[in-house]
Amino acid sequence: MIFPATGQEPPAERLSLSVRQAGEHVPAVAWLPASSSPPSAVVLVGHGAGMDKDAPFVTRISRHLAGNLGCAAVAIDAPHHGERTPDEERGLSAQQRRERMGLAAWRERNRRATAQAVADWQAAIDAVHALDAVPNVPVGYFGISMGTRFGVPLVAAEPRITAAVFGLFGHPAGDKGAVFARAATQVTVPVLFLLQWDDELFPRQDGLALFDLLGSRSKTLHANSGGHLQVPHAEISQAAEFLREHLASG
Amino acid sequence: MIFPATGQEPPAERLSLSVRQAGEHVPAVAWLPASSSPPSAVVLVGHGAGMDKDAPFVTRISRHLAGNLGCAAVAIDAPHHGERTPDEERGLSAQQRRERMGLAAWRERNRRATAQAVADWQAAIDAVHALDAVPNVPVGYFGISMGTRFGVPLVAAEPRITAAVFGLFGHPAGDKGAVFARAATQVTVPVLFLLQWDDELFPRQDGLALFDLLGSRSKTLHANSGGHLQVPHAEISQAAEFLREHLASG
């Protein structure tokens, strides 16, 4: 099964998902298989920094999961993203927003949003399981880059998630005391970790160190030559298949 | 397609392959698809230290390539292995032979055999292409551990090989002047590299450094938790599929 780069549109239905967390509305969508059989699993699709729940990459993998693999997919706007973008940043591209704040401040704002992002995702799991069309099936997580920043603490904290895909993110080997590092050691579910060998945004050694930190007994790293945005399509396809398989067997 | 761990026997035929190199007989076997259609590619299967051309691992992947994937597979006894085992080491297990010599001397003997192993493989390619049943199809290489020690210089030197699987081997990042390191930079074909994260025989950093040295524009590393002999069966299956795909498209 090849992850569709362009053109193909697997049969899947998009619906708005009503999610509230601590009194706040969390913009969320669910993708369901178009067939009448219920999904076999739910996959949470965490977007990267500057993207949102309807970014083309997020939509493509969600449609693939729902239309080709029989899973429900859920995407939310992370804090400060999509419908939650601060007024003064509306209309700017992701690159403009990053340049406006500076990379360090941009990352620090995302880092500070971790607890909220984790709580938002937990509310989204409640919401998708409350749908009549979605029985109480296993939950997986797919999120690379900022999707891993939020995903690692989420998977560490949330026992309903039983398999995860991370990657394009890192943590220095020397900083084992950080909250994020401690969360990584508390991840115990099977993990597939995607790393770009020539990643210009996250040093290779930090990516390898994060993979090393993960507490999972079963973990696999796939590294490919190329930069941050050059993950081969075949890897995304394999990652979706990894989740489908592990959620089916779990 | 799952690499068969035990039991299943894909339909393939084993035949002795007559290989001579510099006046010496090189023990060799070929595995051919049992069907009447000619193989789409040839895969050279290099065994690990202490193994030989008929070791169970070599036979399993050869039968899989021939019986399930439509490729011819070729295996030879590397120098000092199989039928070429020195008299004083006959009847000993691989572990006993290694302990008898000491690990450093064992590795040094294999290292010194590199030029001969490369020439033996080149003669084996000539021999398999001389078979009526095997047209002039693309050639790939599969060899991990000692199979990578010999395979890297072979693939660097042999333009008929157009895709390779390496792994479970390493080279220190600081030793870029070594003959082996220079050969690694001269490998330009697509490579899949298998690494065991907790390999007790080759330090992780040396494996990562070897992957980094490879000159291929298209290269992928798969790392899994576990020791030298704990490569997941699914990785072997994917490696065979990697070769079939790249050899078909090349």
Image (spheres, coloured by chain):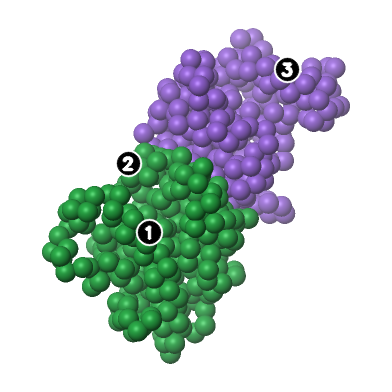
Chain colours: A purple, B green
Residue A12 image offset from top left, x and y in percent: 63, 44
x 31%, y 68%: residue:
B79
x 63%, y 32%: residue:
A202
Residue B4 image offset from top left, x and y in percent: 32, 60
Numbered label attached to residue A105: 3
Chain of residue at mark 1:
B
* Alpha carbon distance from label 2 to label 1: 19 Å
x 37%, y 45%: residue:
B202
| Residue kind at label 2, given as amino acid type | Glu
Q: Are marks 2 and 1 on the same chain?
A: yes
x 79%, y 19%: residue:
A101
- Mark 2 and mark 1 lie on one chain; the one further toward the N terminus is 1
Residue of label 2: B200
| Residue kind at label 3, given as amino acid type | Ala
Residue of label 1: B111
Is the residue marked by circle 2 packed among few (<14), some (14-19), or many (20+) residues within 10 Å?
Answer: few
Chain of residue at mark 3:
A
Chain of residue at mark 2:
B
Is the residue marked by circle 1 packed among few (<14), some (14-19), or many (20+) residues within 10 Å?
Answer: some
| Residue kind at label 1, given as amino acid type | Arg
